[in-house]
Image (cartoon, rainbow, N blue to C red):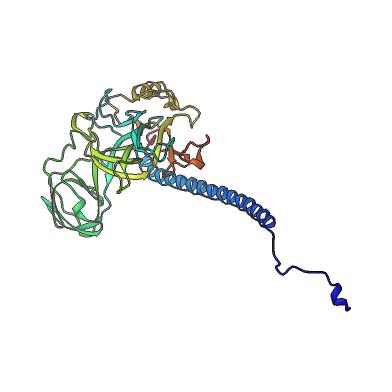
Amino acid sequence: MTLRFFRRFRPLQEGFSLIEMLVAVMFIGILTAGMLRVYSANLAGFQRVNDMIASQRRGRWALASLQDDAASIGYFALVPFNQPTGYSVSAGTQEPFMILPSPTPVLITGPDPANLAGPLVTAPLAPSPDELQFVGDLPLPIQATVSGTTPASLTVNTLTGSLTEVQPGDVVAILDAAFEQIQVGSVSGNIIGVSATGAALAGVTQAGGYALSAALAYHEPGTPIAIFRPNVVTRYSIQARPWDPSNPAITVPCLVRQQAPYPPGGTLISWAGATTEVIAENIDGFVVDLSFDGGATWLRQGSANWDAIVTKISAQTPGGKSVTPRDANNPLWFRTFPFLMRMDITSRSAAPRSESASALGQAAYVRRTQSLMVAPRNFGLPL
């Protein structure tokens, strides 16, 4: 008998038992579930950061546009500090400068945060955003020089821009020692016709300002000119705009700039159909405030309307002088007194997400509020 006879018997099949396989599958499942939770959390955090960056970028873009316009409030090419007449300063009219706290509700149609898969809902922005309106002269983006003159016309050589942007009623200033200014009567090619009725602009008499010439004097060829549109009212507001071409029923809040000529007699402007430019989308908060003491006291807070703000302004005495915002002899009062403007812009993400919510299962927008402080360069110069 050999030793092979005493070897231990081995089964013909080798491998894992069913119990071992089930245990392995269970552990793999636990590890996979944990990894998925970590991945999901990281993805949600990445999305929140992206939404926050996008919201902040929208707000900065809106503030950059506001800064350019707010810094230019009070610019009048024709009006020095001898004040004009013709602007209305009565309550309920188109005053030259107005902050309108929450004038009208802004209704937005979009997904229901409580049920993203459900039907669209329409609701007002809360709180309702402000409006800012101010009048001024608008420089046109045109660089040109004098090519030739007659008493009734000015021939120009355009360097940048296009004369197609020039309209009857615009003003051309010839930038030589005489500084003659004419009101545009017509435009044909590179020839600007002189309006013979240029003594008044939209009912506003430029008292003490440079007179508009009804007949043009001679000017040397090559003399530069500037072209501007006088007495333009600019309005900043938040409006609902359709933004998704595939579903026009969905609207988003947008910061909008509109411009219209100052109305003769100062009647409130009807902004329907006015020239409109969307500055930034998904802006659902806009608050404008002003201060005469460097930001220690803000006058917009607690004021329900422009009349209440005017009452607070009238109580101010910067430099020992009383502010009179509704004085017909000084309708452009805001050019006389320096003050600081503050504009708060609240931007939001493009869509509500459940991972951005403070309450479990409730979707929310990611919002960022940014502030801009501006001291318009045309304010307080006479002091």
In the picture, residue 63 is in which quadrant? top left
Q: Is residue 92 at all visible to an observer of this figure?
A: yes
In-front residue for pair 181/36:
36
Q: Is residue 36 left or right of residue 341?
A: right
Q: Quadrant of residue 266?
A: top left
Q: Is residue 150 left or right of residue 71?
A: left
Q: Nearer the viewer, residue 130 or 39?
A: 39
Q: Residue furthest bottom?
A: 2
Vertical arrangement, residue 23 with respect to residue 363, above or below: below
Image x and y of residue 192, in percent:
15, 52
How many numbered circles are shown? 0
Residue 223 in the image: above or below residue 342: below
Residue closest to the far front = 1
Is residue 237 in sight in this rendering? no
Determine the residue positioned at 14% across, 49% down: 216
Indicate the position of residue 337 as horizontal and vertical percent values: 39, 31
In-front residue for pair 249/378 = 249
